[in-house]
Image (cartoon, rainbow, N blue to C red):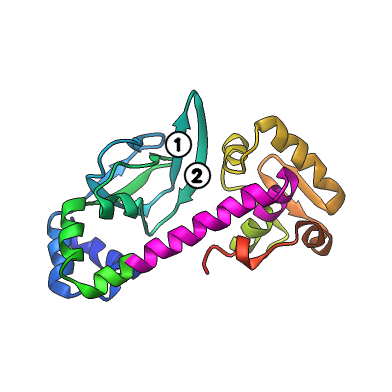
Amino acid sequence: MPESHYPDIRELHLFREMEHDHFMELMRGSYVQNFPPQIELIEEGDPSDFLHIILSGKVDLFSRWNGRETSIATVRPISTFILAATIRDAPYLMSARTLEKCRIALIPSQDVRAVFDKDAHFARAIVTELAQCYRAVIKNTKDLKLRTSLERLANYLLRLQKRNGGAGTFELETEKRRLASFLGMTPENLSRAIKGLQPYGVKIDGSTVTIRDQADLERFAKPSRLIDDFAA
């Protein structure tokens, strides 16, 4: 891996406190690769040979079953994905594909497990990240099981608005078909939900979202930090 990537990777919480020699041990066996859009990086069920770190671009984590497919999460720079499979030496439970041109670092899973056994700071950081991922899964499950499709869309838009600095107008980050899959809807249900939010001051024109009545939308959505705050 080019040394120019070391500082960005070192700044990740996972690697920040580990010993220098152990970090260099991981980097020596790693490499960086460029991928074009819509390339499947890993397939669920395959052995977890590498820990992936996305340096640029966006990656879709998804799953298929019985002829159906669902989008589970979008991974953005700079972060790892599917850490649990690496630590467990277990098959991937999700597939991953690039949504746009991506630059990805790959660290051999056997090296990650070897350093985990001898670097306490690295081990604690891994446990912390896995705990964060677990909490995110619980929040996503609550979102899917406790809310109607209209409430899920409303709260998704509020979270997206927050990522865009609270602007009243912002862009959807994904195509509507994939958004419907992520929210547990069919494309037809998403279209109905978009129309259903119009009385609450929401207008979606193509990929542009405009929130005209913030207070009314929040009264309807009832956002909760125990569901919607994925950073906690």
Q: Marks 1 and 2, how far apart in space?
A: 7 Å
- Residue range (magenta): 127-156
Identity of the residue drawn at 65% across and 53% down: 156
Residue 13's spot in the image, x, y percent?
35, 70
Q: Residue at x 38, y 64 (%)?
A: 129
Q: Nearer the viewer, residue 162 or 228?
A: 228
In the figure, residue 125 lies in which quadrant? bottom left
Q: Amino acid at mark 2?
A: Ile
Q: Is residue 128 magenta?
A: yes
x and y percentages locating residue 176 in the rendered image: 62, 38
First in sequence, mark 1 or 2: give its number: 1
**Residue holding disc 1:** 63
> Which numbered tag is attached to residue 72?
2
Please, what is the three-letter code of the amino acid marked with disc 1? Ser
Residue 101 versus residue 44: which sits nearer the camera? 44
Q: Nearer the viewer, residue 52 or 83?
A: 83
Question: In this image, 79 relative to 165: left or right?
Answer: left
Residue contact at pointers 1 and 2, CB within 8 angstroms:
yes
The residue sitting at 19% across, 71% down in the picture is 119
* Magenta residue check for 18: no
Q: Quadrant of residue 6?
A: bottom left
